[in-house]
Amino acid sequence: MFDQLSASFEDAVKGLRGQATISDTNVDNALRQVRRALLEADVSLSVVKKFIEEVRRKAIGTEVVRGIKPDQKFIQVVYEQLVKLMGTENTPLIRNNGKPTVILMAGLQGAGKTTASAKLALYLKSQGAKVLMVAADIYRPAAIDQLHVLGKQIDVEVFSISKDVQPEEIAAASIQKGCEEGFDCIIIDTAGRLQIDTAMMEEMVRIKSAVSPDEILLVVDSMIGQEAAEITRTFHEQVGITGAILTKLDGDARGGAALSIRKVSGAPIKFIGVGEKVEALQPFHPERMASRILGMGDVLTLVEKAQKEVELADVEQMQKKLQEASFDFSDFLQQMRLIKSMGSLGGLMKMIPGMNKIDSTMIKQGEAQLKRIEAMIGSMTPQERQNPELLASQPRRRGRIAQGSGHTQNEVDKMLVDFQKMRGFMQQMTRGNNLGNPLSMGN
Ligand code: GDP
């Protein structure tokens, strides 16, 4: 179904081809497709309406600049607008102001609040913080046990009293303990309900005034669809949220909730949950979510096509990186995408000094190999992409990448060795010494 969606999206913007500018009349059909894509991705209707109007305003009158066609420009506007709306400068959670940073977790039952509390605790602990988790859900004894079990698993202390003590008193007592014992961060897991109800909201407000939290993070299940907007609105109006965690994105939810949450509350999505395990938490990346919402892959390629001109200028910068040996896997991936958007590897190779004599078999082999490498890079974390040396020193990471990309560890090991060789090789070549053929990588 999503393939079909992307195809019709591309079809729709074709109507903009050959136009000098994007105008009120020629943009309508394309906007209808965007609207459909967003609704399909579970963005709430009122948010979709506002978004479409903003895109219309932004897109109309856009001129054809430097060879970028209006249809490509339009897609770029949609994508950038989505990123901009969801984007945020990610401020660190821990305040480091001499007292514990207090994080209150809010959300409906089943959203993944308790799991998210433990995930966040582990995340902050791995950054060196001393974290305390607090069980303030007195209605479900199982919730208290669940937090203790998770706490044990990640070696983070859990504070609880008993179900006969009011949540706000438990929370207040935890702050005192946190201050006395030098904790950097206190994460308070509160009670949820299956639906929004007054008692739950009042309880949240009481806890809030008892502990004056630095952050109130709303945990939202991404599978909940359009309802995310209403839940966010209620929590925001009645309690006030400072951010959100969007869970269960390892499923097939398209992530439209991210846009709704942001639009309705103005609060940024800070993390996403991508699995049941305590490690399955990632900082939020607006670009990735924009791709997901638009059902991309394909759409992203269209954006990249539009940016081709700009990227060509980047080749120069890339060569500089090569000379300085700071060329990493992200750069490599960017290069590969550029190659794809240009249609052939030969195109790029010809731009490298001394590389104009390559035969077509070599190019074909190179292209097949690049595909395999792209899959491997796709399985790397951003940190690993930026720092190939991490992989060199930690075989466990290479094992994970092998599994994730459908290769053997030997293949990944070899790719890494080849990448390092190639980097050295290209470095020499950009300095003007033509020593052979870098496409032999992996062959
Ligand atoms: P709470 O009632 O809000 O505290 O929700 P829980 O933390 O107990 O989570 C409810 C269920 O969702 C549990 O079965 C969790 O394992 C599961 N869960 C939570 N976060 C995620 C996630 O990011 N991905 C997946 N697949 N499951 C999750």
Image (tube, rainbow, N blue to C red):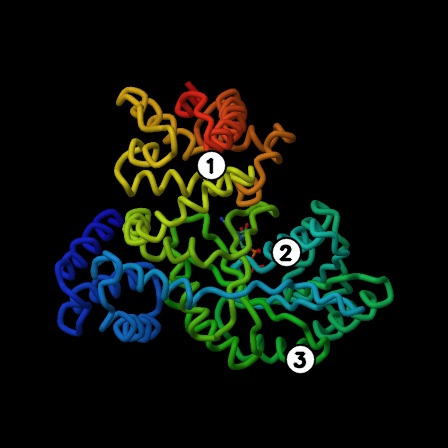
Q: Is residue 426 left or right of residue 30?
A: right
The image position of residue 172, as x and y in percent, is 76, 73
Look at label 1 and name its amino acid. Answer: Ile
- Residue 126 visible at all: yes
Which image quarter holds the C terminus?
A: top left
Q: Is residue 273 left or right of residue 256?
A: right
Badge 2 marks a residue whose secondary structure is helix
Looking at the image, the residue that sits furthest to the front is 432
The image position of residue 342, as x and y in percent, is 28, 41
Camera-near label (1 vs 2) is 1
Structural distance between the alpha carbons of marks 1 and 2:
26 Å
Badge 3 marks a residue whose secondary structure is helix
Against 315, residue 118 (above or below) is below
Look at label 2 and name its amino acid. Answer: Leu
Residue drawn at (66%, 67%), measured in percent from left and top? 103
Badge 1 marks a residue whose secondary structure is helix
**Badge number at residue 206:** 3
Q: Is residue 337 left or right of residue 67?
A: right
Q: Earlier in the sequence, mark 3 or mark 2?
A: 2
Which residue is disc 2 drawn over? 120
Which residue is disc 1 drawn over? 377
Q: Do labels 3 and 1 touch, CB within 8 Å? A: no
Camera-near label (3 vs 1) is 1
Q: Nearer the viewer, residue 437 or 236?
A: 437
Q: Nearer the viewer, residue 188 or 243?
A: 243
Residue drawn at (52%, 39%), measured in percent from left and top? 327
Structural distance between the alpha carbons of marks 3 and 2:
23 Å
Q: Earlier in the sequence, mark 3 or mark 1?
A: 3
Residue drawn at (33%, 22%), measured in percent from left and top? 365
